[in-house]
Amino acid sequence: MAEEIRRRFSLDKVEVDPVIKNRIMSADGDEHVGDWNGENIEDLVKELDRIEERVDANYNNLPHNSNLPEDLRDQVEKDYPIWACDQQGMCLTGEHADKVVSIEKVRRHYDKKHGGVAAFQEKLRLEREQMIADLNRNNK
């Protein structure tokens, strides 16, 4: 018998096929060029090396971005930059995605440079507020 079709709402939990979650796409997003299961960052490095021999991969949308801890997302992952992390806490980093470092090393970088990740995020928030205030002042 056919599976019951029911209305789905935007807040309903969606089950995504794990095979789809593992996909590495081409830079233009048109082609499925490889796979990574999120377990070991060295496997991702090898897969990206294999892919790059014939096509550019989409580094901005690598699989398993949920492995990146919440405190290192958004501003931090763009500032450092962090391209992907595995389940053991090792991350593919660097401007050219050519370094593998631990999450702890990323946090130590922010501890040393800014007094911690939260302090870095607060600095960015204050800079943004100041920029908005300056723009508002100049528009008067």
Image: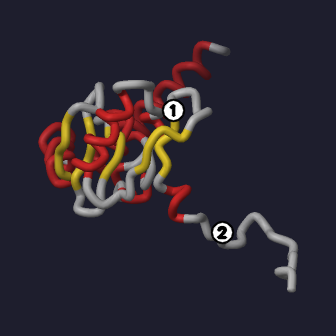
Please tell me the numbered disc located at residue 85.
Answer: none
- Residue, x 19% and y 42% (percent of image)? 100
Q: Residue 138 at x, y = what percent?
A: 59, 13
Question: Which residue is found at the position 22% from the left and 48% from the top?
Answer: 42
Tell me the residue at 26%/56% (across/down): 40
Horizontal side, residue 14 vs residue 10: left or right = left
Q: Is residue 115 left or right of residue 95?
A: left
Tag 2: amino acid: Val
Pointer 2 residue? 14
Q: Residues within 10 Å of mark 1 (few under 14, many from 20)?
A: some
Instruction: Report which residue position mark 1 lands on.
Output: 26
In the rendered view, would you say 135 is above or below 18? Answer: above
Camera-nearest residue between 74 and 2: 2
Q: Nearer the viewer, residue 45 or 76?
A: 45
For badge 1, the amino acid type reads Ser
Q: Quadrant of residue 121?
A: top left
Label 1–label 2 contact, CB within 8 A: no
Local packing at callout 2 (Cα closer than 10 Å; few below 14, some 14-19, many 20+) is: few
Name above or below for residue 99 compared with residue 15. Answer: above
Indicate the position of residue 51 as horizontal and vertical percent values. Answer: 38, 33
Instruction: Tell me: 104 left or right of 140.
Output: left
Of residues 99 and 128, which is closer to you in this image? 99
Colour style of the rendered protein structure: secondary structure
Within the image, what quadrant is residue 101 found in? top left
Q: In the picture, which quadrant includes the N terminus?
A: bottom right
Residue 9 at x, y percent in the picture: 80, 68
- Would you say 44 lies left or right of 31 here? left
List x then y, in percent, for residue 109. 16, 42
